Image: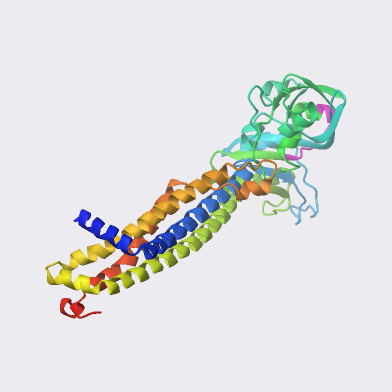
Amino acid sequence: MFYILLEEFIGDLKAQRTRAFLTFFAVTWGTLAVVLLLAFGEGLKRTVRDGLLGAGERIFMVYGGETSTSFAGLAQGRRIRLVEEDLDLIERAIPDVDRGSVSYGRWGTSFQMGKTRTNAFLEGVGPDHEPMRHMEPAPGGRFINVTDVTQKRRVVFLGNELAERIFGKGVDPVGRSVVVDGLPFTVVGVLQKKFQDSSNNGPDAERGVIPYSTFRTIYGTRFVNHLIVQPRDASRGPIVKSELYHVLGRKYRFDPRDERALGMWDFIEGEKENLAVGLGIQIFMGLVGAFTLLIAGVGVANIMYVVVKERTQEIGIKLALGARRRHIMAQFLFEAMAIALSGGLAGLVTAALIVIGVDAIPTEGNPAMQYILNPRLSWPIALICVGILVGVGLLAGLLPARRAAAVDPVESLRYE
């Protein structure tokens, strides 16, 4: 049965090459549109997420603020400034907190090596800063550790772009000395290159990092820039956020409902929002592509109706000779499915080649291109496309096939 259907399909293709090619091309183009739009949408969604995670994952950055309401007899407008001891208080009072770090900061810090001198942002942090903020060192180096903090060592971890400005391209700075605001520091590590489109006080690639105890000793800073807190479980994020206001509210005597008393950068909520926006873009692109493929399906259906009309006498003869109606339906369904699937596979292969080619285009130094030239062809996308193609083939062939099977053999023999 299958071989008979295949022979008839091939014979019809040879007889109507132009019509078959145009139908095949319509399905190929529709599939190509669906796959590319979904691939670029998936790439955009991942890039937006990766850009945020480059600055930190599952964390809260807590800043001191200013009270907006009076509380416990204290007037509004009081300045709330955080200190190192607040992190110990938070970790003791909130069991859901997994790790945390203080962060001091200073703009305009001088970095000098020989005659080369540049200014950058200097940050004083603890060891847990590395996993929370994705500050992974390049091979051969390390981040600030506990011993550095307890002994107040003069060691520095450099952003990769800052290290290049100081030491030049292709030079390994680890183990070498750099003068920071007139004091010699040993470079213990360089940031491994990462994608980051969100930041506080500039990108991590352009900053230096030293132990917070060393920073406090050198600059005599009492108040921290902010605290970084990471919950054990992202699902407990809203609870931890609420507890932060309650715990610090008790210490500094402000209303826990006063959101202006503390500044809060919620990365957990930010990631959810970014994923929602990315998913919305991907759904929109997928719908546009699906409608394009649907139009191609309508074209296939129209062609199949024409085929039924042209082959009415042939269908009548087959029925008169004893062919069953289900065999007639199978013939036209097979033709519609064969056109849809062959055109769809051609579209999938073409789209995959385009994705591979676009993905190979270098995007370094151009953040905009990292969003645009980052398509991702995944198995779910491919399965969705195959499902759409099967649906298109069935819908495009079902009605014409039913019409062909309903032909009256006697009337069809008189049809011209």
Q: Compared to 290, does 100 lie above or below?
A: above
Dividing the image into 4 quarters, which one contains the C terminus? bottom left
Viewer-proximal residue, 92 or 341? 341
Q: Quadrant of residue 396?
A: bottom left
Residue 124 placement, left or right of 108: left
Start-end of magenta stretch: 217-226
Dividing the image into 4 quarters, which one contains the N terminus? bottom left
Q: Quadrant of residue 357?
A: top right
Viewer-proximal residue, 254 or 244? 244
| Most common secondary structure along the magenta stretch | loop
Viewer-proximal residue, 90 or 210? 210
Residue at 62 percent across and 49 percent down: it is 371
Residue at 29 percent across and 73 percent down: it is 310
Rendered location of residue 199, percent (x, y): 70, 43
The question of residue 221 being in magenta is answered with yes
Viewer-proximal residue, 23 or 203? 23
Visible in this render: residue 243? no
Q: Compared to 362, does 320 lie above or below?
A: below
